[in-house]
Image (spheres, rainbow, N blue to C red):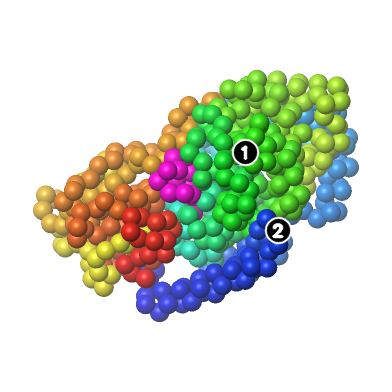
């Protein structure tokens, strides 16, 4: 949809009202912990674009979503109390399984009695729409075969951008920074709902998204384009919108990574990081999106393997009772599911016995789901042994197992047919048009002529944009306006993560490169490179390189649409909120 002047004005008015609401709510906070801005951004309002009350029977309304009820928790507790201690130990683990065979996930669940599995990139079969449902169905059958009447957790990292385990035919989305650039909670809900429906059709029950980290800018190597931005309130709107959409699709969304990964510069895939900022500073920045999401009823939070120096200087937050229970539960008031980040990451395995001993520590700290331990069998044994010795109580296991069961039951709805997979391309194009951000140049005429010279990016990037430009009557050759694509180079996480490949492996081609004489420079990842564009060059930030992104980019270059986004981070002299088209 082309952004008209009236639509832009309406959007600006709506966002101004949202910002004012957030400011008033924060002004009413007391003590050092933020209590959130709008209590209902992601919980109860209906969407102008169809992400509110649904007419489809398989989708819940926003009023249905949220935390499980006390009755649901009580029933889940009765159910899990029947399990043996060993079975409880397995129930709180969501593990990795090797390969993409249909029985691989089921075998992992049966072997250790796991509560579920995580789908990594190497678990995705070539035939996604037939192969993945076969895997997830087998996993659900394994739960029944082991005497459990509740659904298995089938989790996946599907944030968009560089962290998307399933590629085509699932509709591809840009990185989280695009949500911050669009700054429209209703649009975020619509996009997340569509993505959630596609994942749900494939048998997924839990999505490890959205990213709620507030980035500090170019110094942030791990989160980067995954963050919605550097403004905590803008990040909050993006997060709460996505939570709402995922819930309406029947998924359990898990916001991440508490206590905030956007302001530390060590990659926890490799080693644990230390957050030196005092809590008084974190409550004004890093914790604002988490506090707001808690207020809006977010059902799950993922921890980060970050040492919070001001609270517990000796262990990562994932293993700290002072952080998970003292800060997240007691001070922020979170009552939902606490999910650890991957326990196979360097931050854990380098110091904590390949995660087996760490699994016990995480549960003692207040975590409910031990995600992806390096050795699930050893972790089950360690948990069982800890209960036998009195280090960990059986009641603690029952509490977490009940929370897992109640949350999964509460959120899950009937999966739609697999023909919904890949059916949200037009929505993704709308999202791209509303998030692509223009710096410099005019917004009232085409940015290129009838022909362009294209360079930079990867071979696939250039091919995709060439196809989109050609479809709009623009010739790509050796003459005309130079358009340079600048791809990759800013997301470097997980180069050495264990079992299942690195997150960076999911990013696709990079092929960074651009011409200093470019008429138009296009940043396909974070927008920081646009600060050094040549004088007179137009800069466009897309936050991704998906087919829908290139289609929208071609519309903007051809003058068929305006770039609707505003900067979610500062870029050189340009501040958050800047755009040539706003």
Identify the mark at residue 31; answer none if there is no mark.
Answer: 2
For mark 1, give the secondary structure: loop
Q: Around disc 2, counting alpha carbons within 10 Å, would you say few (fewer than 14), some (14 to 19), or many (20 or more)?
A: few
Q: Position of residue 445 (x, y in %)?
A: 23, 71
Identify the mark at residue 309; answer none if there is no mark.
Answer: 1
Who's the residue at 51% across and 71% down the image? 15
Q: Is residue 259 magenta?
A: no
Q: What number of labels is visible?
A: 2
Q: Is residue 219 magenta?
A: yes
Q: Position of residue 284 (x, y in %)?
A: 59, 56
Residue segment shown in magenta:
215-228
**Which of the 4 image quarters holds residue 98?**
top right
Who's the residue at 55% across and 61% down the image? 233
Q: Nearer the viewer, residue 113 or 290?
A: 290
Quadrant placement of the C terminus: bottom left
Q: Is residue 79 left or right of residue 541?
A: right
For mark 2, give the secondary structure: loop
Characterize the magenta stretch by its predominant secondary structure: loop
């Amino acid at each position: 949809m082309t952004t008209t002047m009236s639509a832009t004005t309406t959007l600006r008015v709506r966002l101004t009202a949202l910002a004012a609401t957030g400011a008033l709510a924060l002004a009413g906070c007391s003590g050092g912990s933020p209590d959130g801005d709008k209590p209902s951004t992601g919980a109860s309002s209906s969407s102008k674009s169809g992400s509110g009350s649904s007419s489809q029977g398989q989708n819940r309304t926003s009023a249905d979503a949220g935390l499980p009820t006390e009755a649901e928790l009580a029933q889940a507790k009765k159910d899990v109390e029947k399990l043996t201690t060993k079975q409880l130990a397995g129930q709180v683990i969501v593990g990795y399984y090797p390969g993409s065979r249909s029985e691989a996930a089921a075998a992992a669940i049966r072997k250790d009695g796991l509560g579920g599995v995580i789908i990594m990139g190497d678990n995705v079969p070539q035939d996604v729409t037939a192969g993945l449902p076969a895997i997830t169905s087998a996993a659900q059958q394994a739960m029944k075969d082991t005497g459990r009447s509740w659904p298995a957790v089938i989790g996946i990292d599907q944030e968009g951008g560089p962290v998307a385990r399933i590629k085509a035919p699932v509709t591809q989305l840009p990185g989280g920074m695009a949500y911050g650039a669009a700054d429209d909670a209703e649009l975020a809900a619509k996009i997340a709902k569509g993505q959630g429906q596609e994942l749900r059709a494939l048998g997924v029950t839990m999505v490890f998204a959205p990213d709620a980290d507030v980035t500090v800018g170019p110094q942030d190597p791990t989160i980067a384009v995954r963050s919605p931005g550097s403004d905590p309130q803008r990040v909050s709107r993006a997060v709460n919108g996505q939570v709402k959409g995922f819930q309406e699709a029947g998924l359990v969304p898990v916001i991440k990574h508490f206590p905030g990964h956007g302001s530390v510069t060590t990659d926890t895939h490799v080693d644990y990081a230390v957050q030196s900022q005092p809590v008084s500073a974190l409550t004004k920045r890093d914790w604002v999106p988490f506090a707001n999401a808690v207020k809006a009823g977010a059902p799950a939070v993922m921890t980060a393997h970050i040492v919070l120096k001001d609270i517990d200087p000796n262990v990562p937050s994932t293993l700290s009772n002072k952080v998970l229970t003292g800060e997240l539960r007691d001070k922020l008031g979170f009552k939902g599911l606490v999910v650890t980040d991957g326990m196979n990451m360097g931050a854990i395995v380098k110091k904590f016995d390949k995660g087996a001993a760490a699994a016990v520590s995480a549960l003692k700290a207040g975590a409910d789901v031990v995600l992806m331990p390096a050795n699930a069998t050893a972790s089950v044994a360690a948990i069982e042994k800890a209960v036998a010795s009195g280090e960990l109580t059986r009641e603690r296991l029952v509490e977490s197992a009940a929370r897992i069961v109640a949350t999964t039951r509460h959120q899950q709805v009937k999966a739609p047919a697999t023909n919904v997979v890949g059916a949200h391309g037009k929505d993704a194009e709308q999202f791209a048009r509303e998030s692509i951000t223009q710096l410099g140049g005019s917004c009232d005429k085409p940015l290129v002529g009838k022909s362009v010279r294209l360079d930079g990016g990867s071979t696939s990037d250039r091919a995709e944009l060439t196809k989109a430009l050609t479809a709009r009557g623009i010739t790509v050759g050796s003459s005309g306006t130079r358009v340079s694509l600048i791809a990759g180079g800013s997301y470097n996480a997980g180069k050495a993560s264990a079992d299942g490949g690195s997150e960076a492996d999911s990013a696709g081609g990079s092929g960074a490169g651009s011409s200093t004489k470019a008429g138009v420079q296009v940043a396909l990842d974070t927008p920081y490179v646009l600060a050094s564009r040549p004088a007179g060059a137009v800069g466009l930030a897309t936050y991704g390189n998906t087919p829908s992104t290139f289609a929208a980019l071609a519309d903007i270059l051809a003058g068929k649409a305006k770039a609707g986004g505003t900067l979610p981070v500062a870029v050189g002299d340009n501040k958050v909120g800047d755009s040539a088209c706003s």
